[in-house]
Amino acid sequence: MALSLAGRTAIVTGAGSGINLAFASSLLSRQCNVVFADLALRPEAEEIVAKHSSSSRASAKAVFQKTDVRKWQNLREMFMVAEEKFGGADIVCPGAGVYEPVGPRANGIPRQLWSNFWHPPGEPPSRDLLQQSRYAELDINLVHPIRTTQMAISHFLNPSDSSRRRPASPTNPRSIIHVSSIAGQTTPLVAPIYNATKHAINGFVRSLAPLDKELGIRVTAVAPGVIKTPLWTEAPEKIKLITEKDEWVTPEFVAEQMVNLVEKEEIEVQAPSASIPGASSTRMAKVEGGFILEVGRKLRQVEAFNDPGPSREGNTVTGLGIADREIFERLRQGGWGK
């Protein structure tokens, strides 16, 4: 069931920058309070939080909660802040994520990577340590969304005695929105761990589809293409893969679709034409639990079965072959992974 935003409260992880910042900003503009849960805020995020501080005249309020999404206690604390400041949360977006850079250097300086399959644990510049027995990227991109979703469901169904909210139900809906990717369908060599996390998110979201009808908790996801965020624009090893043939999609456009997944019952999407091979038309798609929306230059519902795959516009990285060649060169040098 759709959820109106005015007077509601959202928790958004990764709200310090990129898509999640754009989503948080869109929520605030619709009079929805937001808990910005991130390690830090970029200057533009700091400005938005200050503009919507508790002492401001803004109708919707924002609060920053420093959050390392790999730490479950930090996740618990962001729900506590939502409870303390706003009486609880109605919308949760576990959107924080990282992407495997394709090379070890930026401007000749080793870049500190979270995880990269092509730089195994213990091999600089990867931050993954052999003694930790885990990949940070899995913790951030997959474990954190799963654990946050568990917490959100519990939060929605069991409001505290001091909360101003009733338990979620089909007549009192709540929303959880995930950030997947077209990498949940495609499999570029450059980012195997990232691809795996986004494939997993798609399956996870679909698994929770029945919560919508039975409990009023709608779990959905956006699957963006190539988005013009610092993740790309401030990473020389990735921006070099973009050519004039590739089209950017803005974080603001993705955020608009995230809002639609929360507050609308139907959205207009592209669909293959039934009469003209290779052409497309539009149709209205019902938004419900398990819905995954591809966001490129066009919008497309990602089907569980017999899906044709991502559309081209806004979803291409023409220079990926450069990264592939660099990977094979590294592997052929010998000693990889030792």
Image (cartoon, rainbow, N blue to C red):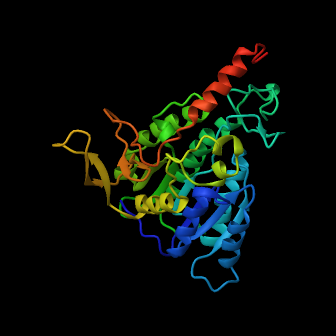
Give residue 142's quadrant in the image.
top right
* Quadrant for the N terminus in the image: bottom left
The front one of 183 and 236 is 236
Horizontal side of 147 relative to 248 (left or right) equals right
Horizontal side of 10 relative to 337 (left or right) equals left
* Quadrant for the C terminus in the image: top right
Residue 191 position within the rendered picture, expressed as x and y whole percent measured from the top left: 61, 32
Q: Residue at x 53, y 68 (%)?
A: 26
Q: Residue at x 41, y 58 (%)?
A: 261
The front one of 185 and 207 is 185
- Is residue 133 placed above or below 40 in the rendered structure? above
- Is residue 126 placed above or below 18 in the rendered structure? above
The front one of 90 and 105 is 105
Residue 288 position within the rendered picture, expressed as x and y whole percent measured from the top left: 35, 52
- Is residue 21 placed above or below 306 in the rendered structure? below
Q: Residue at x 48, y 61 (%)?
A: 253
